[in-house]
Image: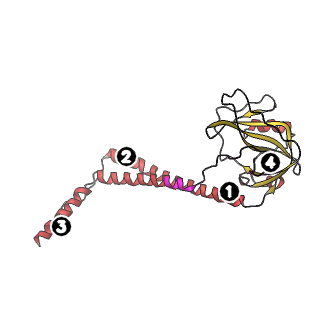
């Protein structure tokens, strides 16, 4: 009867040794990402159900813990202060997120308040004309903390503060230094997004970060499946397991006939 033998051909062995641990590592990395997304979704849901806080209360919270928290601001918009966030697409149309600088009277701080999206000039020759609301308002908003640093072709440069401003991101250090200089340093660092039910806003359907863990679990399954396929390929390529099994089957048939 044929014996099970291994023939470790060096190229196949080297390829398997290099690829197999990497595929397994990628699978576990995707599982870690799934856990991270599940945690984000849980925090978002938990904070969305919590009562709104004042800007003073939000300031006391660590920045990474501010995301998704509801906040109430009371005060007025700074006259003429408009910031346009460039290259924001909705339904295939070019446009901008519109930011106002809002003075919160109770905390005596200025905040960047995202009022929503407006359509823009796709040729980029002009900026939309938007009004800055006058009067006193009590507005509901949600704190927004970007998941990471935005990709920029180049940092925004500002020679001086002239409204309106067109920016690639409101998270730039250059913009915040400019605003701090203008408003005596009393500028709240975290962006606020105007709630859907509050006045003074535009279209407010910001793209939602995909926090579903199922996508990453699916990716993990793909990596593990590829690792399993590689392992099977290595076993079949480096051994006589197929002929060994056929030999055992044939031996079993002969023994049956003899009996």
Mark 4 lies on a secondary structure that is: loop
Closest to the observer: 123 or 70?
A: 123
* Mark 1, residue position: 44
**Quarter of the rendering occupied by the N terminus:** bottom left
Write the residue at 26% across / 57% down. Answer: 241
At a point 76% along the width and 55% down the height, the residue shown is 70
The CA distance from mark 1 to mark 4 is: 24 Å
Mark toward the viewer: 3 or 4: 4
Query: Chief secondary structure of the magenta span?
Result: loop
Q: Which segment did they paint magenta?
A: 195-218
User: Residue tagged by mark 4?
Assistant: 199
Quarter the C terminus occupies: bottom left
Alpha carbon of mark 2 to alpha carbon of mark 3: how far? 36 Å
Q: Distance between the residues labelled 1 and 3?
A: 63 Å
Task: Tell me the quarter of the picture where residue 43 sits.
Answer: bottom right
Residue 99 point in image, percent of width and height: 77, 40
Q: Which mark is residue 252?
A: 3
Question: Disc 1 or 2, which lies upstream in sequence?
Answer: 2
Residue 154 in the magenta stretch? The answer is no
Earlier along the polypeptide chain: callout 2 or callout 3?
A: 2
Mark in the foreground, 1 or 2: 1
Total numbered badges shown on the rendered structure: 4
Q: Classify mark 2: residues with Cα within 10 Å, few (<14), some (14-19) or many (20+).
A: few
Residue ID at (17%, 64%):
251
Question: Which of the 4 image quarters holds residue 152?
Answer: top right
N-term mark: 1 or 3: 1
């Amino acid at each position: 009867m044929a014996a099970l033998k291994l023939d470790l051909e060096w190229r196949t062995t080297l390829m398997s040794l290099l690829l197999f641990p990497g595929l397994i590592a990628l699978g576990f990395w995707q599982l870690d990402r799934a856990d991270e997304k599940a945690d984000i979704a849980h925090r978002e849901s938990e904070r969305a159900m919590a009562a709104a806080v004042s800007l003073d209360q939000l300031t006391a919270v660590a920045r990474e813990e501010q995301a998704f928290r509801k906040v109430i601001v009371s005060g007025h918009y700074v006259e003429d202060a408009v910031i346009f966030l460039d290259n924001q697409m909705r339904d295939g149309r070019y446009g901008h997120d519109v930011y106002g600088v809002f003075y919160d009277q109770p905390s005596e701080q200025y905040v960047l308040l995202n009022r929503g999206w407006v359509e823009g000039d796709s040729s980029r020759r002009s900026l939309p004309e938007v009004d800055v609301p006058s009067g006193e308002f009590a507005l509901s908003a949600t704190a927004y903390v970007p998941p990471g640093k935005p990709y920029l072709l180049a940092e925004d440069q500002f020679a001086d503060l002239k409204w309106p401003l067109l920016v690639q991101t409101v998270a730039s250090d250059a913009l915040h230094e400019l605003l701090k200089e203008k408003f005596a340093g009393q500028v709240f660092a975290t962006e606020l997004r105007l709630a859907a039910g509050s006045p003074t806003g535009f279209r407010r359907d910001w793209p939602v970060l995909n926090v579903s863990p199922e996508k990453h679990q699916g990716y993990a399954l793909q990596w593990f499946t590829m690792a399993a396929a590689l392992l099977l390929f290595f076993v079949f390529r480096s051994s006589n397991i197929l002929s060994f099994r056929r030999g055992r089957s044939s031996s079993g048939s002969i023994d049956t006939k003899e009996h």
